[in-house]
Image (tube, rainbow, N blue to C red):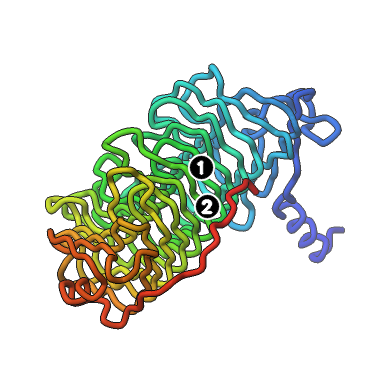
Amino acid sequence: MTTFRSFCLLFLTFFAPCPAADYYVAKSGNDDGPGSALFPWENIQDGLDKLKPGDTLHVKPGFYREKLYFNHSGKPENPITLQGEPGAIISGKDLDDENIIYIEDQSHIRVIGLELRDNLDCNDGSAIRVAGFGTDIEIRNNKIHEIRGKDAMGITIYGTNARKPVSKLVIDGNEIFNCDPAESEALTLNGNIQDFVVSNNYVHDCNNIGIDFIGGEDWVTKHPEAVARDGVCKHNRVTNCRSTYGGGYAAGIYVDCGKNIVIEDNIVTGCDLGLEIGAENKGFIASGIIVRRNIIFHNDKAGIVFGGYEAGRGRVQDCKFTANLCYQNALHKKERNGELWIQHASNNEVTDNTFVGKDGSLIINVDAGGSKGNKVNANRYFTSAGAETAAFHFAGDDIVGFDDWKKASGWDLDTKFGPVNFIPPSFEPK
């Protein structure tokens, strides 16, 4: 006779969720096997298609030639994980499709520890691309390189659904290098993307912008609030990211019409521009951006730049720049636009920063569109030639001398001029 207690136990056993499982793929595997550590599967895609929420697919060392799709989601607290072991390499060489890993309208996904390479001759492709909407997606500790062609990007997030964002996104600890993202970006978040962390990534030796947060591009989403927003960009390193078009104005880190983003504790060197907050799209405003404690040194044409670059574009408003160090960002022979370059912008604050210029180059460069409504004060400036010969530009006028700068601009009444001790950090890979 079945007791009530026995019935309850039977009911709970029957309806209990299946425990998370670990599966394996190896070059010596067989897709007809169980996918265990001893009897792994052979193809990554076949393994991905078999996973259930909470499962992890471990990719053993080897050289795999595949293009991958996540065809279903995990669940809250039970993500689907693709985990590469050291030496697991996925190549896209001579394969169709523009992306090595593609995730569309999926949630609760992890992509960790893979080397992704050889996405060659692609046109608008990525090593990892997320599109549409989704939540709880993490991309960690991947090594991405040799993504070649036009708009050949490393990690691309396109929030193309105007109503549902890509949210709770983490991009951490990845290395992206030797890619051809021009005219796009090596690591980009574009469109309806909310609540993100981009941290501890090393982006270097790419032919356009290193890290970018974008809004206002009609082809992604036309909704005016569906921009990259409410996120953090921290502890990243960006070097040698320069543009091959338009005269070369690629920033290491760029916010274009994004909102409410904290950019902190990053290091940028060897780029056209160090760090830029801009607004390229007419009618859009980049706002609520906090830029703090970044080290920006030895970039070609400028250190920190903010504002719309033309009157007919967007504007930058209500942003704060504090405790940053800009050091000798004037390596270009002709175009030296200042350690700080203010374009079309208003109601922004620049305080407690350090700007160290090379002799003969501009410390501050202010276009007419940025000469009113901004607060610039309580900073520190230095050039070895001295305060009397320090160079500035304000609303069309060249100014020589720190005292004359304060008189002409009405800014920096509490700013000091004096030497700064700075040792450039190393940029060796992790």
- Mark 1, Cα crowd under 10 Å, few <14 / some 14-19 / many 20+, is many
Q: Percent from the top left, x then y, of residue 188?
A: 42, 45
Q: Quadrant of residue 49?
A: top right
Q: Amino acid at mark 2?
A: Arg
Q: Secondary structure at mark 2?
A: strand
- Residue, far bottom: 414
Residue situated in front as seen by the camera: 411 or 35: 411
Instruction: Please tell me whether mark 1 sits on a helix, a strand or a loop.
Output: strand
Q: How many marks?
A: 2
Image-based side of 316 in relation to 134, left or right: left
Give yes or no for contact between labels 2 and 1 (Cβ–Cβ under 8 Å): yes
Q: CA distance from mark 2 to mark 1?
A: 8 Å
- The residue wearing badge 1 is 204
Q: Name the residue: 21% across, 55% down.
A: 308
What residue is drawn where x is 62% and y is 47%?
428
Q: Which mark is residue 237?
A: 2
Where is residue 216 drawn, in percent x and y? Answer: 26, 49
Residue 45 disc label? none
Left or right side of 123 for 201? right
In the foreground, 142 or 203: 203
Pick the front one: 119 or 430: 430
- Judge left or right: residue 193 versus residue 94: left
| Residue 288 visible in the displayed image | yes
- Residue at position x 16%, y 67% in the image: 371
Answer left or right for 331 relative to 245: right
Is residue 52 at least partly visible in the picture?
A: no
Q: Residue at x 44, y 71 (%)?
A: 419
